[in-house]
Amino acid sequence: MEKINISDWVTKWAFLKPDKPAIIYEDSAITYKDLNERINRTARMLQGLGVGKGDRVGVLMYNTYQLIEIFFALGKLGAILVPLNTRLVSAELEYIIKDSGLTALVFGEAFTDVLESLRMNLTINKDHYFCLGKNPAWAHDYEQAIMAQKSVDEPVVREPAGGEDPIIIMYTSGTTGLPKGAILSHRKTFFNALNANIYYGLAPSDIMISPRPMFHSGGLLVELCPMIYKGGTLVMRGRFKPEEILAAIERYKATILEVAATVLRFILEQCDIDKYDLSSLKVCYTGGERVPPTLLEDYAKKGIIISQIYGQTETSTVTWLPVEDAVRKLGSAGKPVFHGDVKIVGTDGNEVGPGEVGEIVVSGCIVMNGYWGKPELTEGTIINGWLHTGDLAKTDEEGFFYIVDRQKDMYISGGENVYPAEIEKAFLQNEKILNVGVCGIPDQKWGEVGLACIVMKDGETMTEEEAVAYCDDKLARFKIPKVVKFVKELPLNAAEKVLRRKLLQDYLAEEKS
């Protein structure tokens, strides 16, 4: 049996529906035929650099159709996309670029300055930098490079790829303070698209608004890939403002919206929803962070029913809540996806019953291959074929999942995963700081923000402003704690590890008093 290669989706739709819009980017349509030809040009350009099966190519750019064509071009070559988070600072980008061993890097002109300061420390061939927009002297013009290719036919590859071969290495912050790259295969991406096909109820006539960044699983795997697989149309902008999302739904008669809870909150706060005709929407989904039931209720009052989904970078979507159950099961993340095995287990590894809290574990075709270059971490995460998510949940008598808490210490701020260990590591580089503990605390605007409890060395002092400023060039903005407290000591367990849950409890108690 021939391996499944997700890049074939574009090729086939270019034959079946050549004039059908695949992407509407900044209000300009790109047909499947045009997209496939640009993908082939990109693939041939990358081939000319020596990019082949297993090689990694990074992209650092805001949402754009060029990112999509690079993604599928790499798939045709059997190479691997490494999407870089546009919100990271230099040190974070440098680590990921080095860890993944990029062969080439394509970036938007907005990131020229940050790469200018980094490139001398990187091992990427100096001729393998490509820029979208106004390019610096040390980078090629991406558009000129692909248009210089004489053929728009399919690239000839020596070693076909697909199936279990990687298509993406997607980095997520690590509990040890270092990012880890989840290896995602063609197979996994295909079955994720099949799952989405079911819960979105997809048809080629569907039009989806895509506000999530494509350096995240949500944008790339929950929005883009299912729509391309089904031959639908994806509406994109570099970055959507809340008002622009509503305007795009009305203008294009969009049928599907999948968006972070933070953005839903911004829409309510900044926009008059009643001004727009949103009647074309058949499903609206949200996930990726704690979703306040009051937010869902506010939308329901306006006639917009929003269902929840739950997933991770390592698995993509794990559970989904059918639209018909969204009101009846408000607060639930739904039931397990069709393709994939999901259960909740106790500390003994056995499946728990309804109402009992345990850890969500996932097996089957939607699980990642492992973590890039980290076999021990992979073995500690995928045990006997089951990926341990670290997230705690329970089910009701009907089998609907309810997310209870995170076994790990990660919190989510504005849709972005934040790991306290990474922030603590940054703070501890300061010679004035003896110890620090970080946890997530509730925030009305962002869902959660960081609280840093700092113990200073004897004789040293620091202000809250100085503590925040110290992180400016070390951490992305969303990772920098919004609240800083100076304490004499931290709550520690027997292994001298910070009890972050106790930090949160103490903070909440103080807020109530």
Image: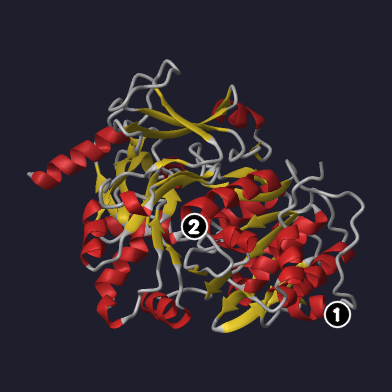
- Of all residues, the one furthest to the top in this rendering is 348
Q: Looking at the image, can residue 69 be seen?
A: yes
Q: Quadrant of the N terminus?
A: top right
Rendered position, 458 above or below 385: below
Q: Is residue 345 left or right of residue 501?
A: right
Q: Is residue 324 left or right of residue 132?
A: left
Residue 296 vs residue 268, the one in the foreground: 296
**x and y percent of residue 201 in the render?**
49, 57
Residue 508 vs residue 161, the one in the foreground: 161
Residue 163 vs residue 496, the one in the foreground: 163
Q: Looking at the image, can residue 475 be seen?
A: no
Q: Which residue is mark 1?
A: 148
Q: Residues within 10 Å of mark 1 (few under 14, many from 20)?
A: few
Figure disc tally:
2
**Label 2 SS:** loop
Q: Residues within 10 Å of mark 2 (few under 14, many from 20)?
A: few
**x and y percent of residue 254 in the render?**
46, 73
Rendered position, 213 above or below 288: below
Residue type highlighted by circle 1: Ala
Q: Which residue is mark 2?
A: 201
**x and y percent of residue 173 in the render?**
51, 46
Marks 1 and 2, how far apart at CA: 40 Å
| Residue at 87%, 71% in the rendered image | 153
Q: Quadrant of the C terminus?
A: top left
- Of all residues, the one furthest to the left in this rendering is 513
| Residue at 33%, 32% in the rendered image | 395
Quadrant position of residue 71: bottom right
Residue type highlighted by circle 2: Gly
Give the mark nearest the N terminus, 1 or 2: 1
Residue 176 vs residue 266, the one in the foreground: 266
